[in-house]
């Protein structure tokens, strides 16, 4: 497999859960992508638009016209907050992620909540033999755009392959327009009461559309550094990519479910195969 832009295993590990999922749970928010106060974040004002997995599940349910019994793939499911929320509403959910640490947490949370979801360790660039298996695919909390452009396009091809005809995709990304107005050179991204913190330095490359981050992790008196990056997309570009991959109907919404505007923090692209 090719196209890796950074070492994802160093990014999506137990430290990530410590700062985001655990902080949310202690605050009574629930372990979920997009929960306020402890949300996964990759840059300016990212992750603050949803108040927890319930709010995200409500939006996905409405925009994808989900119904109990539908087969749903949560692609790059992370620690399973959204996948478990959809499973609790009666969907047959499969969550795929490349992080074994995240999947262990997802399974534990599913058991604790009394819901059933199938969690699979895998790579979004080469999905299993699931051709035409799913009614819906969800790709949430900026979980697309971590490879070079050719490989990012191949991920869309894989999504089309595993969707049944007429199936739909919901992809939650940064709203590029709002994101750029909130750009800062650096910031403390997350902090815990005991002094643990994440400090990020940001760099935006306009030639590639990539947002690069140098992250310093300070935990229990130990310091480590890592680098990660992601691709920023405007809707017209991503619309053209999705159309080329085989999606026929595409539109975009903000985090409130209204048609996308410059004021929105999030861009939720909804596409139909």
Image (tube, rainbow, N blue to C red):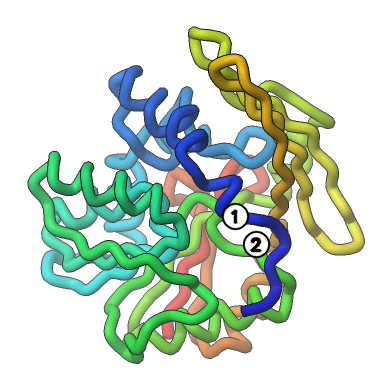
Q: In the rendered structure, which disc, 2 or 1, sits on the residue that comes first in sequence?
A: 1
Residue 53 is marked as none
Q: Are marks 2 and 1 in contact (CB under 8 Å)?
A: yes
**Quadrant (top left/top right/bottom left/bottom right) for the N terminus:** bottom right
Mark 2 to mark 1 CA distance (whole Å): 9 Å
Q: Name above or below for residue 210 compared with residue 184.
A: below
Q: Where is residue 76 in the image (x, y as percent from the top left)?
A: 45, 61
Q: Is mark 1 on a helix, strand or loop?
A: helix
Q: Name above or below for residue 188 compared with residue 46.
A: above
Q: Give me the residue at 21% from left, 44% from top.
A: 108
Q: Where is residue 62 in the image (x, y as percent from the top left)?
A: 30, 57
Q: Is mark 2 on a helix, strand or loop?
A: loop
- Kindly give the residue lying farthest to the top in the view shown: 194
Q: Give me the residue at 30% from left, 49% from top.
A: 104
Q: Name above or below for residue 127 compared with residue 161.
A: above
Which residue is denoted by mark 1 in the rendering?
8
Front label number (2 vs 1)? 1
Mark 1, residues whose alpha carbon is within 10 Å: few (<14), some, or many (≥20)? some
Which residue is denoted by mark 2 in the rendering?
146
Mark 2, residues whose alpha carbon is within 10 Å: few (<14), some, or many (≥20)? many
- Kindly give the residue lying farthest to the left in the view shown: 114
- Kindly give the residue lying farthest to the front in the view shown: 222
- The residue nearer to you, when weighing 227 against 263, is 227
Q: Where is residue 224 in the image (x, y as percent from the top left)?
A: 68, 31
């Amino acid at each position: 497999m090719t196209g890796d832009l950074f070492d994802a295993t160093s990014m999506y590990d137990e430290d990530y859960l410590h700062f985001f999922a655990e902080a949310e749970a202690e605050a009574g928010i629930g372990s979920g992508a997009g929960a306020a106060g402890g949300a996964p974040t990759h840059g300016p004002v990212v992750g603050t638009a949803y108040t927890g997995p319930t709010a995200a599940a409500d939006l996905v349910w409405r925009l994808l016209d989900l119904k109990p019994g539908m087969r749903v793939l949560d692609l790059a499911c992370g620690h399973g907050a959204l996948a478990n929320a959809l499973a609790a509403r009666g969907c047959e959910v499969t969550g795929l992620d490349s992080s074994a640490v995240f999947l262990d947490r997802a399974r534990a949370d599913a058991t604790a909540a009394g819901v059933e979801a199938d969690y699979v360790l895998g790579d979004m660039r080469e999905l299993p033999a699931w051709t035409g298996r799913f009614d819906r695919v969800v790709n949430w909390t900026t979980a697309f755009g971590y490879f070079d452009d050719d490989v990012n396009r191949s991920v869309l091809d894989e999504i089309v392959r595993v969707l049944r005809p007429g199936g739909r995709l919901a992809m939650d990304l940064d709203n590029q327009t709002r994101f750029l107005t909130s750009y800062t050179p650096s910031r403390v991204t997350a902090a815990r009461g005991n002094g643990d913190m994440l400090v990020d330095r940001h760099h935006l490359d306009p030639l590639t559309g990539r947002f690069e981050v140098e992250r310093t992790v300070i935990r229990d008196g130990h310091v480590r550094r890592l680098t990660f990056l992601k691709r920023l997309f405007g809707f017209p570009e991503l619309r053209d990519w999705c159309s080329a991959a085989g999606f026929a109907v595409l539109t975009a919404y903000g985090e409130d479910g209204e048609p996308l505007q410059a004021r929105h923090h999030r861009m939720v692209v909804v596409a139909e195969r």
